[in-house]
Image: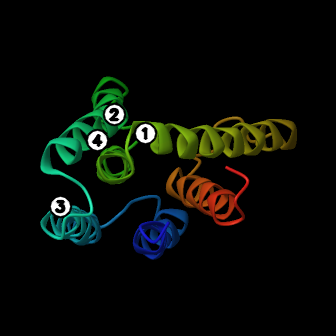
């Protein structure tokens, strides 16, 4: 549960910038990745999880991020590389199941935002992804915190 309190402020910081500028600074992504890397290594060093379990979780959890990086390349950055790097970093820490839950909530929010913009007549509007990723993390974090999961 405590791992969410590390992810959420860092994603929130990136979210504000993505909402305002439609891009994320590389240094913020690097800080996020470094903090998460230190957290995972610290958990393994303190015996909270074994190295073998950590590597399996990190590799499997990073798969959605790798998919989004590939998607960024294929779509010529319609979905930016920063989004893919954030998903990769979060997934490596949270694991495949949790990052898929976060992405499900995030894409649900994007769907409703896209429908809203469509009916408002803005069919070519750019939608920042990281705020929805942040909201997805908040929803899953609260869901776990209340014990409903």
Q: Give the Cα separation between the discs numbered 2 and 1.
A: 5 Å
Q: Residues within 10 Å of mark 4 (few under 14, many from 20)?
A: some
Circle nearer the N terminus (4, 1) = 4
Q: Give the Cα separation between the discs numbered 4 and 1.
A: 25 Å
Q: Classify mark 3: helix, strand or loop.
A: helix
Number of marks in the image? 4
Q: Is residue 62 above or below residue 16?
A: above
Q: Are marks 2 and 1 in contact (CB under 8 Å)?
A: yes
Q: Is residue 93 left or right of residue 105?
A: left
Residue occupied by mark 2: 72
x 55%, y 46%: residue: 102
Which marked residue is nearer to the observer: mark 2 or mark 3? 3
Circle nearer the N terminus (4, 3) = 3
Which marked residue is nearer to the observer: mark 4 or mark 2? 4
Q: Is residue 13 left or right of residue 88?
A: right
Residue occupied by mark 4: 57
Residue 100 percent location from the top left of the image: 50, 37
Q: Is residue 88 left or right of residue 132?
A: left
x 30%, y 32%: residue: 63
Q: Is residue 83 above or below residue 47?
A: above
Residue occupied by mark 3: 44
Residue 73 percent location from the top left of the image: 27, 30
Q: Are marks 4 and 3 in contact (CB under 8 Å)?
A: no
Q: Classify mark 2: helix, strand or loop.
A: helix
Q: Residues within 10 Å of mark 3 (few under 14, many from 20)?
A: some
Residue occupied by mark 1: 79
């Amino acid at each position: 549960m405590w791992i969410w309190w590390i992810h959420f402020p860092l994603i929130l910081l990136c979210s504000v910038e993505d909402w305002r500028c439609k891009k994320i600074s590389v240094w913020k992504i690097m800080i996020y990745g470094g903090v998460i890397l230190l957290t995972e290594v610290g958990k393994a060093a303190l015996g909270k999880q074994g190295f073998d379990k950590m590597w399996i979780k990190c590799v499997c959890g990073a798969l959605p991020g790798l998919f989004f990086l590939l998607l960024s390349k294929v779509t010529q950055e319609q979905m930016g590389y920063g989004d893919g790097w954030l998903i990769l970093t979060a997934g490596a820490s949270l694991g495949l199941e949790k990052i898929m839950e976060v992405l499900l909530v995030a894409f649900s929010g994007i769907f409703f935002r896209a429908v809203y913009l469509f009916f408002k007549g803005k069919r070519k509007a750019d939608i920042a992804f990281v705020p929805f990723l942040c909201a997805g993390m908040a929803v899953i974090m609260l869901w776990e915190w209340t014990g409903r999961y």
